Image (cartoon, rainbow, N blue to C red):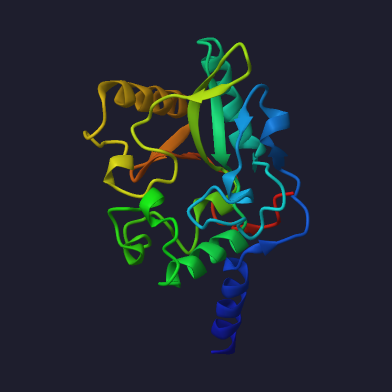
Amino acid sequence: MRFILFVMMISCVAAGPKVSAEAPDGFVDLASFVPGVVVEARYAGNDNFVGAPVDGYVAAKAYLSIEAATALRLVQHQLQAQGLTLKVFDGYRPQRAVDHFMRWVKDDADTMNKDRFYPDISKTRLVPEGYIAEKSGHSRGSTVDLTIARVTVDGEVIELDMGSPWDFFGPISHPSSHNITDEARANRMLLRIQMLAAGFKPYEAEWWHFTLRHEPYPDTYFDFPVK
């Protein structure tokens, strides 16, 4: 009996987030690792569904495991040949940020950004319908939220039309949605094909969300700050 309890205690400890003050070996800063990639880390500012900087995002950066970043570099190379670029909104996500999201979900009084991010769905449905989770694949370090953009000669970054904005919670953001234009559907397909070819798998509730199929830390949830 004591042995069983000991094993259960060890399992509980192992299942907890791996907390550290700095990014561990095996993670890289995408802006430095992937030439030309555009990073717009919105969780580091106010332009997100919470409406405030999210816990754990000290700087407007995006980190990924080396394996995921290397695969993403292949996608960027293919798109650059077409005069396009990847634009990344989020990569690795600290567990403390996920905890922040869960506190926000439970705050019934805070619906400040409902019209913009989830106008057609109750806040109480965001977790059951898979838009927010207590444990996020992002915290394992090999999941990325991104889109495709075009950079003008003046340096302006123009996102391709994807039919819905990033982090818009609703059926129109499902990759299979038919309530978008042919152009948006083609742009989603371009992103999907490129990511699949590089070894990522999609998420069927969000067109922007991809996870490396053979992620290096499939059972580890990290909690170091993005800084």
Whether 126 is drawn above or below 59: the answer is: below
Task: Name the residue nearer the viewer: 169 or 120.
Answer: 120
Residue, far left: 178
Whether 27 is drawn above or below 132: the answer is: above
- Quadrant for the N terminus, please: bottom right
Residue 62: x and y, percent? 64, 41
Task: Name the residue nearer the viewer: 188 or 12.
Answer: 188
Left or right of 28? Residue 153 is: left
Residue 136: x and y, percent? 50, 56
Residue 164, quarter of picture:
top left
Whether 175 is drawn above or below 77: the answer is: below
Q: Residue at x 26, y 36 (%)?
A: 176
Residue 70: x and y, percent? 63, 29
Residue 86: x and y, percent? 54, 26
Q: Is residue 193 visible?
A: yes
Left or right of 5? Residue 36 is: right
Residue 10, quarter of picture:
bottom right
Task: Name the residue nearer the viewer: 200 or 59.
Answer: 59
Q: Residue at x 68, y 44 (%)?
A: 60
Residue 68, quarter of picture:
top right
Q: Residue at x 57, y 53 (%)?
A: 139
Q: Residue at x 38, y 56 (%)?
A: 114
